């Protein structure tokens, strides 16, 4: 693993990565921890801001140029922006089921699936992840796997007393 390809990348990509990495970690934490607390609401606002920055910065990234500089991944950014707005409205209405569905979709679609796509050969994050020290790559993937397992596996179940 080496940060050199990322450090040599355009500023839009650097901003994008600087927003999405903490969003991935914070999102896993939020999915795994109790909901509705003051801490959840505070961290949720920070996570939402990070997701908006991630989505907006993607419109300045044109590595995959399919249609006038844009690619299908940019549609995901539109969905994240719309989803952010809808998730906030649902939370304010106390429509927790809708809020949870939207936020989970944003996390797993916008971070997990899109993040895996950045690891394809030829992409900057592939060069970052798979070059240099291979043990760092294993540690990174271990941390990602642990975050996903924590987010999915340790969510409180309905009716269970903590």
Image (tube, grey):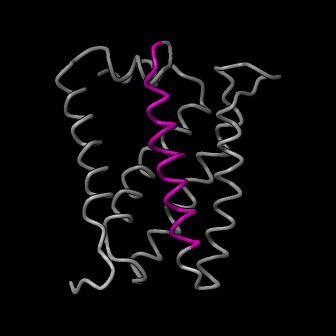
Tell me what residue is drawn at x 53 percent, y 55 percent: 105
- Camera-side residue of 75 and 157: 157
Q: Is residue 39 above or below residue 115?
A: below
Which residue is farthest front?
A: 159
- Where does residue 28 sit, x and y in percent of width and height? 36, 56
- Camera-side residue of 89 and 13: 89
What secondary structure do most residues of the magenta stretch adopt?
helix
- Where does residue 159 sit, x and y in percent of width and height? 30, 85
Please give left or right for residue 66 compared with residue 125 in the image. Answer: right
* Residues rendered magenta in the picture: 98-121
Tell me what residue is drawn at x 70 percent, y 27 percent: 71
- Where does residue 72 sit, x and y in percent of width and height? 69, 31
- Camera-side residue of 122 and 128: 122
Please give left or right for residue 158 compared with residue 48 in the image. Answer: left
When asked about the image quadrant of residue 153, the answer is bottom left
Which residue is farthest left?
A: 135
When asked about the image quadrant of residue 99, the answer is bottom right
- Where does residue 32 sit, x and y in percent of width and height? 31, 65
Q: Is residue 119 magenta?
A: yes
Tell me what residue is drawn at x 59 percent, y 81 percent: 95
- Camera-side residue of 148 and 27: 148
When asked about the image quadrant of residue 57, the answer is top right
Q: Quadrant of the N terminus?
A: top left
Q: Is residue 116 magenta?
A: yes
Q: Quadrant of the C terminus?
A: bottom left
Q: Is residue 53 above or below residue 4?
A: below
Tell me what residue is drawn at x 63 percent, y 82 percent: 92
């Amino acid at each position: 693993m080496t940060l050199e390809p990322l450090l040599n990348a355009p500023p839009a990509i650097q901003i994008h990565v600087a927003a999405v990495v903490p969003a991935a970690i914070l999102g896993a934490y939020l999915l795994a921890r109790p909901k509705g607390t003051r801490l959840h609401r505070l961290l949720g606002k920070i996570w939402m801001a990070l997701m908006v920055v991630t989505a907006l910065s993607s419109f300045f990234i044109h590595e995959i140029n399919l249609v006038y500089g844009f690619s299908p991944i940019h549609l995901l950014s539109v969905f994240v922006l719309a989803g952010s707005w809808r998730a906030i409205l649902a939370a304010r209405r106390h429509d927790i089921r809708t809020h949870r569905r939207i936020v989970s979709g944003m996390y797993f679609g916008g971070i997990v699936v899109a993040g895996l796509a950045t690891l394809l050969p030829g992409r900057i994050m592939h060069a970052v992840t798979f070059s240099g020290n291979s043990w760092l790559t294993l540690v990174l993937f271990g941390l990602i796997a642990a975050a996903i397992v924590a987010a999915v596996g340790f969510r409180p179940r309905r009716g269970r007393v903590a």
